[in-house]
Image (spheres, rainbow, N blue to C red):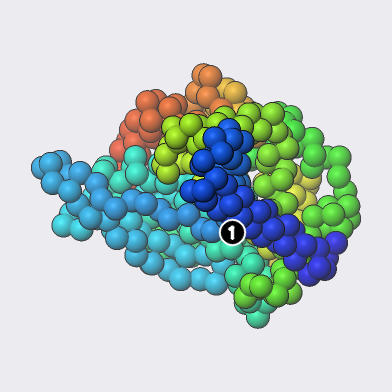
């Protein structure tokens, strides 16, 4: 399937459905048709409106939508998004709050690169912004990156994180959410050995697959069933001529989205049927609950083929992080080299993406870290999304994470650097 044709066929199907929705909405909305009193016309217009919006969102990067926050004095403070480090495959951005002095807490949110944009963390950023200076890894859509920019795999991702942490300095508190948890742990260990003065103060790992074999999920089962050859043949395509990355091998976001939806197809079908009826009755709104969720959920991005394949092979199949055998730029990364950075893991009891046990496995790898610098939390009744953006995050996990950050904000005692041994 590594052809531009297959990529363009998917994009053509998406474009056609968007056009069909727009056509149905326009045709059924002619005023003269209202004289017929045919109940199918409002339904047709509603179907067209929902369909057009659904398929148009799949290729549009959502806006962060964080315009301002309320300060302690009751005044609004405007928020600007500033680029701190600019790289071909992703930038480090800051949510800069105007007229506010630098906060005691400096937080780096490491966003997932798993098919959705970093804007998936919008509510997480908004919840932390009043209490901290917030920085986020804003990963780019691979379809928009020219082939001349080169490759980007799990080692490159890790080195990006190293550069971002180095740019922010040692007073940073890192929060890695879902997919990047193992690579963020590796990046921290890399700094611990190569440049201890640049290590962050604390590291919070939320719902990440440090050891995928610690608890089985549908995701880990898939990783065991499929071979790398099968995965490369069925999942990898070349970007078509419509985008700047034409010719780049990618794992398409539209293919990932199909997988997402198939996991809960009944629930998604019911949600769209209900939304069509609401639109037909005039009860839907541009920013109602359905549109707020699906405008983000349906907005997907392509991943480079090498990043997707190396994640499956090295993190899930070979378990290089779990076995402490990960190599970056020819150097073996020893998780045990982390001796100063406080580490906390957060898991959801009902997480069906990264099940309980997968993330807390990180603490066993931290053989050089004192017990008092390790912490873990299992949130009862919480699913995957809830532990970083839902009710569980707002009510329980966020306060716990901020308390953990505050408890580990002091400067650590100086230690001599430990150099990494070169891999064989």
The quarter of the rendered structure image containing the N terminus is bottom right
- Return the residue found at the far bottom: 148
Is residue 191 visible to the viewer in this orientation of the structure?
A: no
The quarter of the rendered structure image containing the C terminus is bottom right
As rendered, which of 102 and 351 lies closer to the eye? Answer: 351
The residue under label 1 is: 59
Q: Residue 249 placed where, x, y %?
A: 74, 67
- Return the residue found at the far left: 73
As rendered, which of 285 and 151 lies closer to the eye? Answer: 285
Is residue 82 shown left or right of residue 210? left
Q: Residue 122 placed where, x, y %?
A: 42, 46
**Secondary structure found at label 1:** helix
Is residue 330 shown left or right of residue 119? right
How many circles with numbers are drawn on the protein?
1
Q: Residue 360 placed where, x, y %?
A: 58, 32
Q: Image point 37% across, 52% down: which residue?
A: 65
Q: Residue 310 placed where, x, y %?
A: 73, 56
Is residue 351 visible to the viewer in this orientation of the structure?
A: yes
Q: Image point 88% across, 52% down: which residue?
A: 230
Q: Image point 61% across, 32% down: which residue?
A: 273
């Amino acid at each position: 399937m590594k052809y531009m044709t297959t990529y363009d066929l998917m994009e053509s199907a998406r474009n056609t459905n968007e056009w069909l929705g727009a056509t149905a909405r326009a045709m059924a909305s002619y005023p003269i048709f209202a004289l017929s009193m045919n109940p199918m016309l409002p339904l047709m217009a509603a179907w067209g409106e929902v369909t057009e919006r659904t398929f148009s969102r799949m290729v549009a990067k959502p806006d962060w939508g964080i315009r301002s926050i309320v300060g302690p004095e009751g005044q609004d403070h405007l928020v600007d998004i500033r680029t701190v480090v600019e790289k071909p495959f992703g930038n480090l951005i800051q949510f800069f709050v105007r007229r506010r002095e630098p906060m005691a807490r400096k937080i780096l949110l490491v966003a997932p690169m798993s098919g959705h944009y970093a804007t998936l963390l919008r509510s997480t950023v908004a919840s932390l912004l009043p209490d901290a200076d917030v920085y986020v890894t804003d990963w780019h859509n691979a379809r928009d990156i020219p082939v001349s920019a080169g490759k980007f795999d799990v080692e490159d991702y890790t080195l990006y994180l190293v550069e971002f942490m180095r740019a922010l300095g040692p007073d940073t508190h890192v929060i890695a959410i879902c997919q990047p948890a193992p690579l963020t742990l590796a990046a921290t260990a890399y700094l611990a050995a190569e440049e201890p003065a640049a290590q962050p103060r604390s590291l919070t790992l939320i719902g990440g697959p440090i050891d995928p074999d610690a608890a089985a999920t549908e995701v880990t089962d898939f990783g065991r069933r499929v071979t790398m050859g099968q995965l490369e043949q069925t999942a990898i395509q070349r970007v078509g001529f419509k985008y700047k990355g034409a010719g780049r091998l990618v794992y398409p976001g539209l293919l990932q989205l199909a997988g997402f939806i198939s996991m809960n197809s009944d629930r998604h079908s019911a949600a769209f049927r209900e939304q069509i009826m609401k639109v037909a009755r005039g009860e839907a709104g541009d920013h109602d609950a359905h549109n707020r969720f699906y405008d983000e959920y349906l907005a997907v991005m392509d991943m480079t083929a090498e990043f997707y394949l190396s994640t499956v092979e090295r993190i899930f199949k070979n378990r290089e992080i779990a076995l402490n055998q990960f190599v970056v730029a020819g150097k073996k990364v020893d998780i045990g080299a982390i001796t100063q950075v406080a580490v906390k893991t957060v898991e959801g009891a009902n997480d069906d993406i990264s099940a309980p046990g997968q993330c807390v496995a990180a603490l066993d790898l931290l053989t050089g870290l004192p017990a008092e610098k390790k912490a873990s939390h299992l949130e009862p009744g919480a699913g995957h999304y809830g532990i970083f953006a839902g009710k569980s995050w707002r009510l329980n996990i966020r306060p716990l994470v901020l308390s953990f950050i505050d408890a580990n904000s002091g400067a650590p005692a100086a230690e001599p650097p430990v150099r990494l041994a070169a891999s064989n």
